[in-house]
Image (tube, coloured by chain):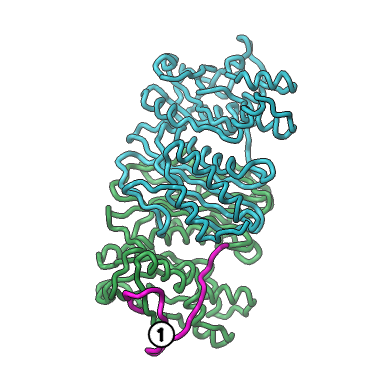
Chain colours: A cyan, B green
Amino acid sequence: MKTRGEFGFIDFIKEHFPVPDNFEGIGDDCAILPPQQEEMLFSTDLLMEGVHFLRNESSPEDVGWKAAAVNLSDIAAMGGEAIATFLSIALPKDAQGEWAERFIEGYAQISKLYGVPLLGGDTTSSLRDIAANVGVMGKCPKGTSIKRSGAAEGDTIFVTGPLGDSAGGLQAILDGEERDQDIKVLIQRHKRPSPRMKEGKQLRESGMVNSMMDISDGIASDLEHILELSGKGATVELERIPVSDELRRAGEKYGWNVPAMAVGGGEDFELLFTAPAEIAEKLGFKVYPIGKITGGKGITWTKEGKEVEWEIKGFKHF
Amino acid sequence: MKTRGEFGFIDFIKEHFPVPDNFEGIGDDCAILPPQQEEMLFSTDLLMEGVHFLRNESSPEDVGWKAAAVNLSDIAAMGGEAIATFLSIALPKDAQGEWAERFIEGYAQISKLYGVPLLGGDTTSSLRDIAANVGVMGKCPKGTSIKRSGAAEGDTIFVTGPLGDSAGGLQAILDGEERDQDIKVLIQRHKRPSPRMKEGKQLRESGMVNSMMDISDGIASDLEHILELSGKGATVELERIPVSDELRRAGEKYGWNVPAMAVGGGEDFELLFTAPAEIAEKLGFKVYPIGKITGGKGITWTKEGKEVEWEIKGFKHF
């Protein structure tokens, strides 16, 4: 496929992302956004070929979707609303045509679904590997964004949905499992995660949530961040960690260690939060209590009321 | 050198960048910034090893400096003030220790010089090449940021300093020229460009500037952007394009095509702007008039009053 050249590619991007009134998007040295009366949130994530995705295993649309999704999820994790994203992409020669355009299509799909404009970025060549960096700007009424550091003793620990699906999907891809309906669902959850934007905002608006983050590295590792920053401990009841029917069935069929996937697997992008137990009845959506914040240190894992050894390391890049 | 690991590296970064009051930096899902009464600016640039720098030719400190500099320059180009930067960095195994830390030191030097905090980012591994993406947030009183699109017929075209030094420095590196004092100056200008933050702000505050951008791809290419977006043409007097004494002397010594470097060379990061001629006497710093905005189309190059053919393509990545 003949490429459009760098400026043609930029035009292709512009066509996919309408710029809202009062904003200036691609085309000048900077994007321009109107003054913001609320506090501002910002997060950024860099996806590298060979580390975060493989070109022969992920469609470009899926990579584009996920690049935006993981960033939007960081805004959800503070209870914020996303204002805009910014995309930098480095493309080796063999990705400058079709691959790049299909990436943009996936990125545009999720951007449209969540109503978030792309306002700027950078395009460059790359010697070998594709690199895609997304930055996301969000907002929250002043002083209301929910941090990791606010967990209070006695809080119930909740998650917004089943865990381990993404890990199951990845396992199925790696093992080349036959793609029955359950496997298809898991792979979809791995490749096209849904950031919990609406849930994050509602949780913030409840005024009851003391700490929150998104589950990107696995709950074992992510909950530790909340505990460290809050100076607290936790007990987690393993049997209460929600697991989808698809993962349970696939796990039985293929002999997977489903609890390990649910506890140690990352990239589900569900929200992990701590709040008084009553919050569960005050939300318009289901949340899953999995444990309690204590005055101690670290995580105590229990199964049917008994303490169990459970050591799972979260993901570290180096 | 033993690496500190990803979390140790993040701590190393935190030590180098104090977080201002009312801001929350590294450590949560998002950075938090106070509400912004002014309009917001945002720009981002991705530097790839092998494309933007070579590990055996640039010191890590220089790469870190330049990664921040090129972004700050985009804020200067709108007349804005930088609020904060965000850094994503992907590191192959052999860059995870000393290289990464020295990069951060260079990045911290320029950040301190311009008083801009680093508030967040992402660290990840890379299979092979280093990738570093910087995002920069800035601000400007509402409606005052200077765009590329406002050039008016009769405007004088100015630049804020000599052009071609960076191209000369690069040429000297590529040719392995002996590093006399002139060459050292040119190489320094190539490796450690100074974004014109103060000048950009003063130009905006003058209220007289109709269009502005920074010179990153070479004036021949960059001026075209202003002309296209403004629907105007320009005449440029080649002999008025300012060239430093260092570049002139080095050019004579090594037989370089100095005018081609000044017109076609990028990365000087001086500002290019158009305004009524009188502005030159109203600023606290020297600016160089190089031509006029006309009602025509494209650039007409002249030399001693005669039109000359001059075709230099600016840099495109693909």
Q: Which quadrant of the rendered structure holds the C terminus of chain B?
A: bottom right
Helix, strand or loop under label 1? strand
Instruction: Kindly give the residue lying farthest to the top in the view shown.
Output: A305
In the image shown, does A160 or B176 lie closer to the viewer? A160
Residue at image x 29%, y 67%?
Answer: B209
User: Which amino acid, by three-letter code, is at mark 1?
Assistant: Thr
Residue B191: x %, y % from top left: 53, 67
Residue B165: x %, y % from top left: 50, 75
In the image shown, does B131 or B153 lie closer to the viewer? B153
Tag 1 residue: B302
A175 left or right, relative to A122: right
Res A215 quadrant in image: top right
In the image shown, does A73 or B178 lie closer to the viewer? A73
Residue B218: x %, y % from top left: 48, 71
Residue at image x 62%, y 79%?
Answer: B177
A179 left or right, relative to B51: right
Tell me if I can see residue A157 in this picture.
Answer: yes
Disc tally is 1
Tell me if I can see residue B32 in this picture.
Answer: no
Chain bearing tag 1 is B
Residue A295: x %, y % from top left: 50, 19
In the image, residue B128 lies in the stretch drawn in magenta = no
Instruction: Kindly give the residue lying farthest to the front in the view shown.
Output: A1
User: From which residue to which does the magenta span run?
Assistant: B290-318
A275 left or right, relative to A63: left
In the image, residue B298 lies in the stretch drawn in magenta = yes
Residue A226 vertical position relative to residue A118 in the rendered view, above or below: above
